[in-house]
Image (cartoon, rainbow, N blue to C red):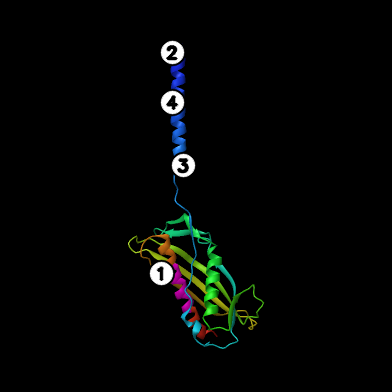
């Protein structure tokens, strides 16, 4: 009996230490470091040029709406026609809504095309208001050999001096920028270029507002 008892005790001790050791290994397992990024649009090359449009054009960004599919901070990757995935470890530092709004209005204000460009927090009286819908915002990895940073925006411009409150300009802008490799850093660099190109095109279109 004593032999069996001692054997059981010994077996219990062995299993206890094995379990504790495996628990420690599991507990100390290294996980990927979480990283945060921002889309940053390069300053406009037009900033040193004289203003080319009527000085009464004061722009206010009224709102930016991001599709629910892409409104979280986590990056979204499209793997196939039907498969999307969210990346927990790579994300926007602030919401994509805030990020795009701040970069867009900052670029417009530095462009010297408008008298002023600001958001709704300003008390400046505006001549035109802008609304933006972010329709697409993801890494397009459907072709793994040709990854792309994709952004699609619909931008609407309103002249609040008009009583019918219909947009004087509405257009969808889309860019798919080729990435050097399939990494979060390359994805953000592509988004930088995409938003910069879209904003430049929007400024060029300002001549066509009714």
Q: Position of residue 8 (x, y in %)?
A: 45, 19
Question: Would you place residue 67 above or below residue 24 in this image?
Answer: below
Please identify, in this view, whether the residue under mark 3 or under mark 1 is nearer the observer. 3
What is the spatial separation of the Cα atoms under label 2 and label 3, in whole angstroms? 38 Å
On the rendered structure, is 58 left or right of 17?
A: right
Disc number placed over residue 14 in the picture, else none: 4
Q: What is the residue that sits farthest to the right in this orientation? A: 123
Upstream in sequence: badge 2 or badge 3 = 2
Main secondary structure found in the magenta portion = helix
Q: Earlier in the sequence, mark 4 or mark 1?
A: 4
Crowd band around label 1 with a 10 angstrom C-alpha radius: few (<14), some (14–19), many (20+): some
- Please name the residue shown 62% across and 82% down the image: 127
Give the position of the C terminus as an image quadrant. bottom right
Choose between 96 and 13: the one closer to the eye: 13
Q: Where does label 2 land, which residue?
A: 3
Q: Nearer the viewer, mark 1 or mark 2?
A: 2
Q: Does the magenta run of residues contain 195?
A: yes
Q: Marks 1 and 2, Cα distance to the nearest angstrom?
A: 74 Å
> What residue is pinned by disc 3?
28
Extent of the magenta region:
190-201
Secondary structure, mark 1, is strand
Q: Secondary structure at mark 2?
A: helix
- Tell me whether the residue at label 4 lies in contact with that at label 1, contact meaning CB atoms closer than 8 angstroms: no
């Amino acid at each position: 009996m004593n032999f069996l008892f001692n054997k059981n005790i010994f077996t219990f001790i062995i299993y206890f230490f094995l379990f504790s050791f495996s628990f420690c290994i599991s507990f100390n397992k290294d996980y990927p470091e979480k990283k945060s990024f921002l889309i940053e649009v390069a300053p406009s090359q037009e900033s040193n040029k004289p203003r080319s449009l009527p000085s009464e054009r004061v722009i206010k960004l009224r709102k930016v709406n991001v599709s629910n599919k892409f409104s979280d901070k986590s990056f979204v990757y499209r793997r196939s026609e039907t498969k999307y995935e969210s990346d927990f470890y790579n994300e926007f530092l602030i919401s994509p809504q805030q990020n795009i709004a701040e970069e867009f209005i900052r670029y417009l204000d530095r462009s010297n095309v408008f008298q002023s460009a600001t958001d709704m927090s300003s008390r400046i009286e505006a001549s035109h208001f802008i609304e933006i819908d972010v329709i697409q915002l993801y890494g397009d990895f459907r072709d793994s050999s040709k990854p792309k940073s994709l952004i699609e925006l619909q931008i609407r411009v309103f002249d609040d001096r008009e009583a019918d409150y219909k947009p004087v300009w509405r257009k969808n802008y889309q860019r798919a920028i080729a990435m050097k490799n399939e990494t979060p850093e390359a994805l953000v660099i592509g988004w930088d270029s995409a938003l910069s190109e879209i904003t430049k095109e929007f400024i060029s279109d300002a001549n066509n507002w009714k």
